[in-house]
Amino acid sequence: MLAAAGLLDGRRATTHWRHARLLAAAYPRIEVVPDALFVEDGTVHTSAGVSAGIDLALALVERDRGEAVARTVAQELVVFLQRPGGQSQFSPSLALPRPSTPKLRELTDAIAADPGGDHAIPALAARISVSPRHLSRLFRDEVGASPAKYVEAVRVDAALRMLAEGHSVTTAAARTGIGSPETLRRAVTARTGISPRAYQQRFSARG
C-alpha cells in the first residue's frame, strides 16, 4: 500500500522475504532491502512481518525512551530486544527460480537430490551433453546464478536442514559436499547472519 501510494519512492524499505523480489520488480524506484527485519528511512518505517513489526516497535521505544525502557518492554513481551541476524535465517529453501529448459530442470533436481555429489562444471555439462560455456550461459539466463553459485546455495540449504535435524557441523559439511566445518561456518553466517551453532539452537527440533 505504501509503495502503491508512492510513499516509498526514492527510499529504502523492506518487506517479507517472500515478497521482496515482487516489490523490487513492481516498484523500481524503491531500494528494497530483502534481508532486513525492519528499515527506517526518514519518517517512513517498514518491517518484514508481524514479529519484525515488534522488533521495529522496540527500536522506536529504545530511540524515544532509552534502552532500559525498551529492555523492560522486551522482557514483558518475552522477546529479544534486538534479534541477531536478518530474515534469511527464517526463509526456507532456495529462492532461485526453477529453470524452464527440461534438461536444465532435470540437472538442478539431480543436484538438489544429491548435494554432496560431483557437481563440478565439466561433470554437470557432460551430464546434459553441452559445453561448460553453454551450461554457464543456461544457468545465467534461467537461474540468475553461475553453476558453482547454484551448487553452493543447494549445499548450504541442505546443510541448514541437517543442522535443524540435529546433525553436527562436521557431519553436515561432509555429507553436503561443503567440505570443512570452517567453510560451512562461513557459508552459513554469510547466508543467515548467524553462526551454525546459533542456527541449530534456534531451529533444531531436538532443541
Image (tube, grey):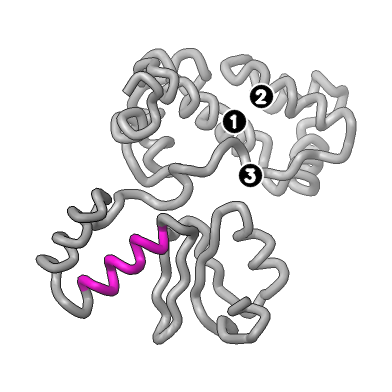
Looking at the image, tell me whether mark 3 or mark 1 is earlier in sequence order.
3
Which of the labelled discs sits on residue 38, or is there none?
A: none
* CB atoms of marks 2 and 1 within 8 Å: yes
Residue 35, x across and y down, in percent: 47, 56
Query: Residue under circle 1?
Result: 154
SS at circle 3: loop
- The numbered mark at residue 95 is 3
Residue 90 colored in magenta in the image:
no
The mark found on residue 112 in the picture is 2
Q: Specify which label sits upstream in the sequence, 3 or 2.
A: 3
**CA separation in Å, label 3 and label 2:** 13 Å
Q: Amino acid at mark 3?
A: Ala
Can you say which quadrant of the picture contains the N terminus?
bottom right
Q: Toward which corner of the image does residue 130 lie, by quadrant? A: top right
On the picture, is 6 further left or further right than 130? left
Q: Which residues are magenta?
A: 52-62
Nearer to us in this view, 88 or 177: 88
